[in-house]
Image: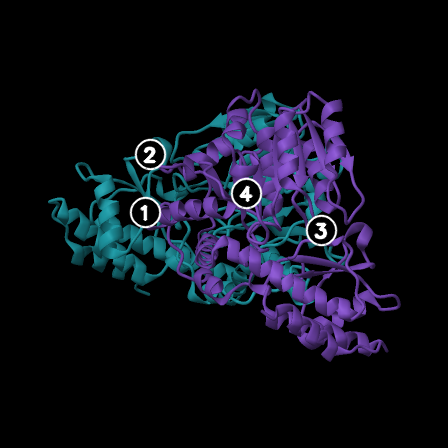
Chain colours: A purple, B cyan
Amino acid sequence: MGPGPSDVHPRILEALGRPTIGHLDPDFVAMMDEIKTLLKYAFQTDNELTLPVSAPGSAGMEACFVNLLEPGDKAVVCVNGVFGNRMVENVTRCGATAVRVDQEWGKPVDPDAVSAALEANPDAKVLAFVHAETSTGARSDAETLCNLAQRHGCLSIVDTVTSLGGIPLYVDRWKADAVYSGTQKCLSCTPGLSPVTFSDAAVAAIKARKHPVQSWFLDMNLILGYWGEGAKRAYHHTAPINALYALHESLVMLQEEGLENAWQRHATMHRALAAGLQSMGIEFVVAEAARLPQLNSVYIPEGIDDAQVRQYLLSKHNLEIGAGLGDFAGKVWRIGLMGYSARRENIELLIRALSDAMREQGRSVDTDAALSAVSAALAP
Amino acid sequence: MGPGPSDVHPRILEALGRPTIGHLDPDFVAMMDEIKTLLKYAFQTDNELTLPVSAPGSAGMEACFVNLLEPGDKAVVCVNGVFGNRMVENVTRCGATAVRVDQEWGKPVDPDAVSAALEANPDAKVLAFVHAETSTGARSDAETLCNLAQRHGCLSIVDTVTSLGGIPLYVDRWKADAVYSGTQKCLSCTPGLSPVTFSDAAVAAIKARKHPVQSWFLDMNLILGYWGEGAKRAYHHTAPINALYALHESLVMLQEEGLENAWQRHATMHRALAAGLQSMGIEFVVAEAARLPQLNSVYIPEGIDDAQVRQYLLSKHNLEIGAGLGDFAGKVWRIGLMGYSARRENIELLIRALSDAMREQGRSVDTDAALSAVSAALAP
């Protein structure tokens, strides 16, 4: 129940361990086509260029930046947590200039501040932001931000690592241009792959580049030769066959559940967890309207030892929760309710185990009251 | 029995499917330390900076080039197959200049030509070459080439994707500086990771850079924060936990067998396969002295249809062999004997299945004679 990797469903682990076949085997190529179709559903897009990058989410982030930006370009980057800062790093390593729009950690990106930055930088090519900040638990208004990008003639780059499969995400409806995610959050798959999708406008920008993409491994022009529809599959790199079996299974499970049902489940489980934690006197970092159901950042209660609690949970209850990152280190816990982790039994385990850990530190906790609050929140 | 991914041992598939734990979990961190130790054994090195990059071999290649080269640098690159060409692409995308030393496909790199190129380019910073060319089956003399690099004050970048675990490779003894490999060849692990190792000289060059590494994801300065010895493990990217379980298991198996025994097994199985194929009138592309035991490139016999044979083997015998790449397309088959694939039963299956496929095309083949030749080669 950390900030990811989430619990991986046994069906997905079983798929992962299937015998490895060749990356040009016709059966494997047919599965690649299914993955693309299933990813389009998950992203709610018809984008042809929708596929998993063969590396973790950080590489998916880099794929978006190195394909869209060239030396001398300018990008407006919203920073309200760790991953916005990482985006700035990506921009500068492309030889481009980043215009930062900073926001206090724990708050969503401020559309007015973004609008002002875009007004002040009419030469910006890209607006980049994080939909669901894993370091803080804040959800930004992706639709409004994508619209702002459109109005100012910018391409949008959207980090959906923690949002995909967990909260509403409509790539086409919102007209997002370059979107990357991860497999190890709300898809409940193993870590190591980064689903990405690029709009027609983004593809046109890639084709109009003056300089080659600085990364050979992440050059979408080359990757398309292997993942492209209908075309003869040209060898680019050896695909991570087994990881793709697992991603396929996780996307089949998402389709079986239904995307809206998955979003609903995350929302419901979050309300139950929040009721339980608040009954224990634990407060959320993020205001209710901007709270991510799948990533619950809460303040560590006064006088409670952060590391001791996390160590106790792990050793006594086999339960992981996340530490605070950056500015939040030592002040905040991050409790994940992602994918297969977003279940009633996990919430009850967390409440019991955390009560136990706090009692170890001399705090009196009414576990039964907290569990009743969870039950009440889940009552039909 | 293609050019990789090779057959994955059931023990490794079992390890792959184990429950996913957190990438900062103390048990996982302990396993990371074991992986580093086991990789040092496999590479025969004491290099501290020895770890698996969280992406396939192509990303390992890119990691070596983007960390060692800066804009304006010069690299001498040996090209005797597909992967030498890819190295040239990597050099130019770093903003550096590549001096090519071309060699006919199927032949090893010519040390005299390399020596001349290094003489003519005293400002070269790097000498890059492929130890075991997967596209042709040729083995180059890595020790001699690394010595040449040393004598000319160059850092060596060595592709050992297909050699690691299959033929002698001594990173420290040969003084190789930046070496990358893959998991899906002679380690018999699933594809998706790239073990790398960097010498002290390579690390010093990385630390002395004037420009930041152009890739955030592959920046060794940052990756070391997560993989570094003793240090507090700083989050860089989410490690591909399950893939690392599998790599760990494959390296444990290599240690159990013993590196020299693994090399010997590949050599023995290659001699047996060669005896069988030659008894069928099938000829090798590479001269005997430079032949890779694990990657057998053979000419497609006159009048035999390439695609039909490969299709027949796959559909009737569940057996994959590789097509020719680039200049060798349609002319050559590549038969892998890598890791778990390098077994007597696989060789006999290949001989029977290939005889069968050739008979389908009206060719008379004495399968029993070929199998006897295999047996004779394996007799003590």
Residue A17, label in figure: none
Looking at the image, which is closer to me, A379 or B331? A379
Q: Amino acid at mark 4?
A: Tyr
Q: Secondary structure at mark 3?
A: helix
Labels 1 and 4 positioned on one and the same chain: yes
Give x and y (percent) for residue A73: 67, 24
Residue, x 53% and y 41% (percent of image)? A196
Q: Amino acid at mark 3?
A: Ala
* Residue at mark 3: chain: A
Are discs 4 and 2 less than 8 Å apart at CB?
A: no
Residue A170, label in figure: 4
Labels 3 and 1 positioned on one and the same chain: yes
Is the residue A124 above or below the residue B184 in the image?
above
Give x and y (percent) for residue B322: 33, 45
Looking at the image, which is closer to me, A114 or B378? A114
Residue, x 73% and y 32% (percent of image)? A114
State which quadrant residue A191 falls in.
bottom right
Read off the residue under disc 1.
A26
